[in-house]
């Protein structure tokens, strides 16, 4: 029997996106699938891998800001030429949904990463006068996709936006069996506080910069804020670069998933200072899941899903939105007593091992793709 074949397409996400490349694609490859992965490698400055068994990669135009039509046309070309040669097509961006119109494709799946309608309100490149009309377009796009495609949801809270029931593949993470205790000093003897994820105003960049400055000053450099992730927008980039130059924090930019997750091991705490915006309210912040999976205690703002996880796991502290001082005070307490942070970290890791290990959830995803591939055309 020949291997099942899947075409995975994104024009928005980084080719090393954790959910796409290091969870879904990796799980399919491990299960013996042949995967064609079309992503904006050149647009993100990433070399295409050539030595992964079963994986074929293609470069497509990156979709960014208002420059999105060229990417959509390029993706449509790939779908038309390569889609019929595969058993399943898996899309990861809303703009790819209309790109499939009029093309004879095998079963097509849209992986819904976020609240498509709410995200429009966060895009700085969208003029204010167009936000309401584009939100309506996003809702129409979701309805159209549900009629024509199989949907996979990244969060169970997205289910209310759709008429039918759909498979939920949550943003869980591989859970290491025995991570080092929180508060393990680095090679320079420092305690590291980490932030992992994309960086934007609504994701708490101003608060991170302020926390980094206070943490550096009030500990005399004994504790450092390490920020891992890509910045969105020139103003955010400039703010982070200025803080880095002043020595208030360390900022690595984007790192591949395995390298980024390795930075969590032994950290004193993980920060999730997201703002109270519509797109965040129903979702579980992936960074919170990743922190507790690596036995790192969490400091989070009171978004409902994060609060539920932190309280059930007893793995951290909830602080008010925009409250830099309470965040810093919490961190200073753990600087003085790293053993207390390690206890919280162990409690979080125990829950993550029970409920949030991708090794468990990946089976449901791979099995679902297999059923679709084997179903009559």
Image (cartoon, grey):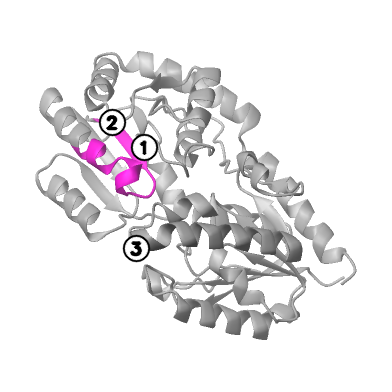
Query: What residue appears at the point 33 percent right and 27 percent down from the top-left corner?
Result: 268
176 displayed left or right of 320: right
Query: How far apart, in angstroms, are the residues tagged by discs 1 and 3?
Result: 21 Å
Q: Earlier in the sequence, mark 2 or mark 3?
A: 3
How many C-alpha atoms fall within 10 Å of the one at disc 1: few (<14), some, or many (≥20)? Answer: many
Q: Position of residue 305 (x, y in %)?
A: 53, 30
Looking at the rendered structure, which numbered label has been put on residue 127? 3
Q: Is residue 316 above or below residue 101?
A: above
- Dot 2, crowdedness within 10 Å: few (<14), some or many (≥20)? some
| Residue 232, magenta (yes or no) | no
Q: Secondary structure at mark 3?
A: loop
The crowd level at tag 3 (other Cα within 10 Å; few <14, some 14-19, many 20+) is few
Q: Is residue 25 visible?
A: no
Q: CA distance from mark 1 to mark 2?
A: 7 Å
Residue 348 visible to the viewer = yes
Quadrant including the C terminus: bottom right
The mark tally for this picture is 3
Residue identified by numbered label 1: 275
With respect to residue 33, does 322 lie above or below?
above
x then y, percent, for residue 107: 77, 68
Q: Is residue 221 left or right of residue 283?
A: left
Residue underneath mark 2 = 322
Residue 331: percent from left, percent from top:
27, 22
Q: Earlier in the sequence, mark 1 or mark 2?
A: 1
| The N terminus sits in image quarter | bottom right
């Amino acid at each position: 029997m020949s291997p099942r074949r899947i075409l995975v397409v994104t024009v928005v996400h980084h080719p090393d996106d954790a959910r796409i490349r290091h969870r879904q694609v990796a799980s399919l490859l491990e299960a013996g699938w042949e995967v064609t992965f079309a992503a904006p490698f050149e647009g993100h400055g990433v070399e295409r891998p050539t030595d992964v068994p079963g994986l074929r990669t293609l470069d497509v135009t990156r979709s960014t800001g208002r420059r999105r039509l060229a990417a959509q046309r390029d993706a449509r070309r790939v779908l038309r030429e390569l889609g019929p040669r595969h058993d399943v097509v898996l899309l990861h961006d809303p703009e790819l949904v209309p790109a499939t119109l009029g093309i004879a494709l095998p079963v097509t799946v849209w992986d819904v990463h976020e609240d498509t309608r709410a995200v429009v309100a966060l895009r700085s490149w969208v003029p204010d006068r167009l936000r309401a009309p584009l939100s309506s377009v996003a809702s129409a796009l979701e309805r159209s996709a549900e009629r024509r495609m199989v949907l996979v949801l990244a969060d169970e809270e997205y289910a209310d936006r759709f008429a039918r029931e759909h498979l939920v593949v949550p943003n869980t993470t591989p859970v290491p069996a025995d991570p080092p205790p929180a508060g393990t000093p680095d090679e320079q003897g420092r305690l590291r506080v980490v932030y992992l994820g994309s960086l934007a105003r609504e994701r708490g960049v101003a608060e991170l910069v302020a926390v980094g400055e206070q943490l550096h000053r009030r500990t005399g450099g004994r504790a450092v804020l390490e920020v891992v992730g890509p910045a969105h927008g020139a103003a955010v980039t400039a703010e982070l670069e200025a803080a880095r130059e002043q020595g208030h924090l360390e900022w690595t930019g984007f790192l591949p998933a395995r390298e980024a997750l390795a930075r969590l091991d032994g950290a004193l705490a993980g920060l999730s200072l997201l703002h109270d915006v519509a797109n965040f309210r129903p979702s579980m912040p992936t960074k919170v899941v990743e922190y507790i999976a690596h036995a790192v205690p969490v400091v989070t703002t009171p978004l409902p899903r994060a609060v539920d996880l932190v309280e059930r796991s007893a793995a951290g502290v909830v602080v008010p939105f925009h409250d830099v001082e309470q965040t810093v005070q919490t961190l200073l307490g753990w600087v003085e007593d790293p053993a207390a942070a390690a206890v919280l970290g162990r409690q979080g890791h125990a829950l993550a091992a029970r409920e949030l290990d991708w090794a468990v959830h990946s089976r449901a995803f791979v099995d679902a793709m297999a059923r679709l591939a084997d179903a009559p055309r």
